[in-house]
Image (spheres, rainbow, N blue to C red):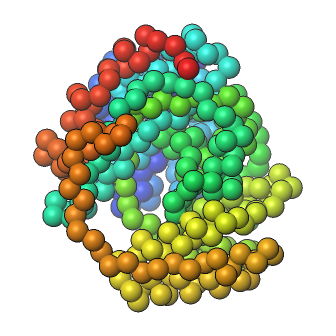
Amino acid sequence: MTKLSICLPIDADDPSAEPLIASLLADTQAEIELLVSPGPGVTLEAPADPRLRFVAWPEGRGAQSAWRALAEASTGRWVTLVKPGDALETELTTVIDFLENNVADVDALGWNVFQIDSHDEPTRAGPVAIPVDYHIERLSKDGMLKAFFYWEGSINAPKMPYGLFHGAVRRTVLDAILSLPEADDWQTLVPQYEWAARVLLFADNLAFCARPLSAVNARRYQPVKDVNPNWAFPFTAALGLTGAIAEVQFHCLREFGSTFTATQDFVRACMIDCMMETERPRFVEKGNAYFDALQRFDHVNLAPLFRPEFREPTGQDRRRGLHGKALMVDRFIGGARDAREFYGVVRSMIAPIGLICGGTVA
């Protein structure tokens, strides 16, 4: 069985996937399979490599279904998923070897991920934090359940390093998730959070690597019209990122006979989602929509706690150097324009994989 399956769905508006494919296949000895699913309108010139496989994009379906089709076609002992504009550590299989040899019961691996927007402007972009720590440790499932489903310590999205997207899932967990029928009565624009929810519910033993192992081609979330208008759940993708994630949580929980619970932390996340707006008209519109949703859903009188404040854009964050346990570096360090270039530069500054995998899991 192949050690690692890397899934690569390609939407029509994604950057070229060819540079990422070339980098992932550069090591001819790497025990990987690369599964590529070009969406409608995508053309691709791919190298001849027996480790490269194509998976048909489900006809008439969105990214949610394409991600599942890739997962179903994978054969590796571990599976991950990235997008064309992202960067992924080429020595990830070495980390997997280390886990299998030292902590055989771990069934989901997460790590720090750099968030890099290729549309950043040098005059406005702040620094990027590089974690000083690089060790691998176990994390409590109970703690992660509270962080994700109860939004403890979150900003506008819950803290969640686990899932298929920029995380690695063991085959046993993946098969358990795929044993559930595909949801055909709802769709989501944020399938990464659907997989995060399912992996967290099915995985028992979680490991986390403090050393970043990838970089995401981050994009600002764009609210769209409600994609599931028939469900009597007021938090939807039409509100913003927080609403889209809550919608995913609602559907995933109902499949297990459970219900979505609104908490004070969730209300704070809704406020933060509004306060990220830099234009007052959009802030007011978004705030009114979230407040209306809270009023319609509220069973414990949380709506009065929703009091976001509009803040004018501040000056550029000029922090550099060591701050606590993070090294703050320029977003455009080494001339890096996008996620792949940024990871390529920073990779020479952080702990080598050989050093990390020569120790033990905390």
Q: Residue at x 86, y 55 (%)?
A: 257
Q: Nearer the viewer, residue 8 or 301?
A: 301
Q: Is residue 143 left or right of residue 342?
A: right
Q: Is residue 91 left or right of residue 299?
A: left
Location of residue 1 with respect to 151 vertically, above or below = above
Q: Could you say where residue 336 lies in the image, as x and y percent from the top left?
A: 18, 46
- Choose top left, top right, bottom left or bottom right for residue 191: bottom right
Lateral position of residue 216 relative to residue 37, left or right? left
How far across and how far down the image is residue 145, in percent?
69, 46
Left or right, residue 332 beside residue 17: left
Q: Can residue 32 be seen from the camera position used here?
A: no
Query: Residue 40, position in %: x, y?
Result: 44, 59
Q: Which residue sits at x=47%, y=41%?
A: 166
| Quarter of the image that includes the C terminus | top right
Looking at the rendering, in which quadrant would you find the N terminus? top right
Is residue 161 visible in this depiction of the protein?
Answer: yes
Picture residue at 73% right of the left edge, 55% below the top: 252
Closer to us: 272 or 232: 272
**Spot occupied by residue 99 in the image (x, y as percentages of width and height):** 55, 18
- Between residues 277 and 311, which one lies in front from this camera angle? 311
